[in-house]
C-alpha cells in the first residue's frame, strides 16, 4: 500500500498527484479540517485515507458489503463515518483504520452522512425515507427522524449544531430540532426531487436545489421561503453559499454555473464553459473564486466577481462528481467515475489564464 496507489500525473502540470487504488468509481470525497488527509468512498465497497501532501495511500477501510455512497470525517479528524448500499453506517478510527461500530437502523441504502460541528453526533439519510441521529462515540442510535415520504438525498447540521436539514425525492426540505430529534418545519416550494441542501455560514438561511431547475433560499429559523432562484433550464444538481453568505452558486444539467445574489435572488453572472452537466460547485475560502466539476471530465476555476474562466483542469477520463477545496485554498481535490482522485495546485490554477 502506498506508492503504487498514487503517482504524480504526467498530464496537466497543475495536477500534483493522481490517487489510484480504488477499483470502482469514487462516490464521495471529504477533507480533514487541517487539510492533511483526504477520505474517499467508492463503489468498490472501501473507504480510503490519503495524505494530501504526498498523495500516499495511508489506510484502506474494509467492512462494507456493498458500494460506499457517502463519507464524512469528524471536526477533530479522529473519526470517519461511512454510509453504504448495504444499509449500514460504519464508524472508523481515522488514524488506525479500525472499525469502531456498525450502526444498523436503516432498511435501505444510506445516501448521506454528516458529523455535528462538535463531533459528538452523526446524522444519516436513507432511501428508507428516514434520517437517523447517532452518538458519534459508540454508534448508539439516539433518534429516528420521520417526516419524509420518499428517499432522503442529503443532510446537514446547522453551524451551531442545534438544527438538522434534510431534502428528499418527495419534493420537500425538512428542518429538525437536533436536540429533541423532532420535526420543526416542512419546507415546501419545489415541484420535483430536491437533491442538495446547505446552511448559510451564519446558520440563518438555507438553500436547496431541485430537479425542477430552481434553487430556493429559506429562512432557517422559521422555514419560510425567502426567494426562488430561477434561471437554469434543467435540473440543478449542486449548490453552495459563499463564505460571507451573500452569494450562492448553482450547477445544473444545462452545463451552466450561475452566481446569484442570495439576498435579492437575482443572477449575477453566468459561468459558461462546461460541455456537460455540472455535478459539483464550491467557493474558495476567500470567496473570490469558484470551482466547478462536470460530467465532461473537467474541473474549472472561475473569478467570482466577473465570472471569467481562469483555468480548465484536465486529466480525468470520466465524469468528475466531487470537488473539495483545502481549508487554506492551496489545493483542490476531485473524485471521478474513472476510479481516481486528483490533487490540483489551486493557487497555480488561479494564476493560469485560458488561451
Image (tube, rainbow, N blue to C red):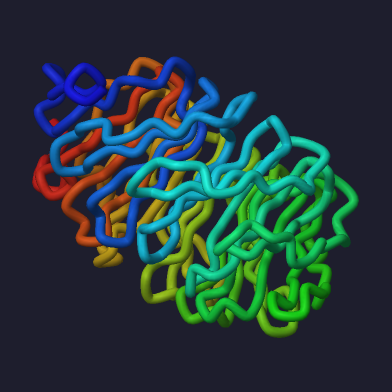
Count of residue discs? 0
Asked if residue 124 lies left or right of residue 174, the reply is left
Q: Quadrant of the C terminus?
A: top left
**Is residue 259 positioned above or below 120 on the image?**
above
Residue at 38%, 76% (x, y): give it: 244
Q: Which residue is nearer to you in this view: 127 or 3?
A: 3
Q: Is residue 74 above or below residue 171?
A: below
* Quadrant of image for the N terminus: top left
Residue drawn at x 48%, y 74% as measured from the top left = 118
- Which x, y percent locates residue 296? 41, 23
Instruction: Residue at 15% x, 24% y: name it.
Output: 12
Nearest the viewer among 219 and 51 is: 51
Q: Is residue 87 left or right of residue 247?
A: right
Q: Position of residue 328 (x, y in %)?
A: 20, 61
Query: Image quarter for residue 237?
Result: top right
Looking at the image, can residue 233 be seen? no
* Residue 279 seen in render: yes
Residue displayed at 43% across by 48% down: 281
Q: Pinpoint residue 210: horizontal percent, then vertical percent.
A: 68, 49
The reply, left or right, for residue 132 in relation to residue 116 is right
Instruction: Provide residue 146's location: percent of width, then percent of height.
Output: 86, 60
Amino acid at each position: 500500500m502506498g506508492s503504487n496507489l498514487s503517482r504524480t500525473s504526467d498530464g496537466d502540470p497543475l495536477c500534483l498527484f493522481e490517487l489510484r487504488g480504488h477499483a470502482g468509481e469514487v462516490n464521495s470525497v471529504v477533507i480533514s479540517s487541517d487539510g492533511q488527509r483526504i477520505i474517499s468512498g467508492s463503489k468498490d465497497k472501501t473507504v480510503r485515507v490519503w495524505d494530501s501532501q504526498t498523495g500516499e495511500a495511508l489506510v484502506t477501510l474494509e467492512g462494507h458489503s456493498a458500494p460506499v455512497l457517502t463519507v464524512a470525517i469528524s471536526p477533530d479528524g479522529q473519526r470517519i463515518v461511512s454510509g453504504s448500499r448495504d444499509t449500514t453506517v460504519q464508524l472508523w478510527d481515522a488514524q488506525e483504520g479500525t472499525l469502531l461500530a456498525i450502526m444498523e437502523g436503516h432498511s435501505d441504502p444510506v445516501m448521506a452522512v454528516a458529523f455535528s460541528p462538535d463531533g459528538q453526533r452523526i446524522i444519516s439519510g436513507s432511501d428508507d425515507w428516514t434520517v437517523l441521529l447517532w452518538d458519534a462515540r459508540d454508534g448508539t442510535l439516539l433518534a429516528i427522524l420521520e417526516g419524509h415520504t420518499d428517499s432522503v438525498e442529503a443532510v446537514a447540521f446547522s453551524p451551531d449544531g442545534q438544527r438538522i436539514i434534510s431534502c428528499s425525492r418527495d419534493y420537500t426540505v425538512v428542518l429538525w430540532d437536533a436536540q429533541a430529534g423532532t420535526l420543526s418545519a416542512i419546507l415546501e416550494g419545489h415541484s420535483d426531487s430536491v437533491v442538495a441542501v446547505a446552511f448559510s455560514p451564519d446558520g440563518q438561511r438555507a438553500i436547496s436545489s431541485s430537479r425542477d431547475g430552481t434553487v430556493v433560499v429559506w429562512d432557517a429559523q422559521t422555514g419560510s421561503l425567502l426567494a426562488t432562484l430561477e434561471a437554469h433550464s434543467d435540473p440543478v444538481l449542486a449548490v453552495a453559499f459563499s463564505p460571507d453568505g451573500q452569494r450562492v452558486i448553482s450547477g445544473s444539467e444545462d452545463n451552466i454555473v450561475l452566481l446569484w445574489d442570495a439576498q435579492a435572488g437575482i443572477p449575477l453572472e453566468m459561468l459558461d464553459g462546461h460541455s456537460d452537466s455540472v455535478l459539483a460547485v464550491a467557493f474558495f475560502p476567500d470567496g473570490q473564486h469558484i470551482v466547478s466539476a462536470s460530467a465532461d471530465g473537467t474541473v474549472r476555476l472561475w473569478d467570482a466577481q466577473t465570472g471569467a474562466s481562469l483555468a480548465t483542469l484536465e486529466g480525468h477520463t470520466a465524469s468528475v462528481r466531487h470537488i473539495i477545496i483545502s481549508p487554506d485554498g492551496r489545493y483542490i481535490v476531485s473524485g471521478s467515475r474513472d476510479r481516481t482522485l486528483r490533487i490540483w495546485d489551486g493557487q497555480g490554477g488561479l494564476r493560469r489564464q485560458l488561451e
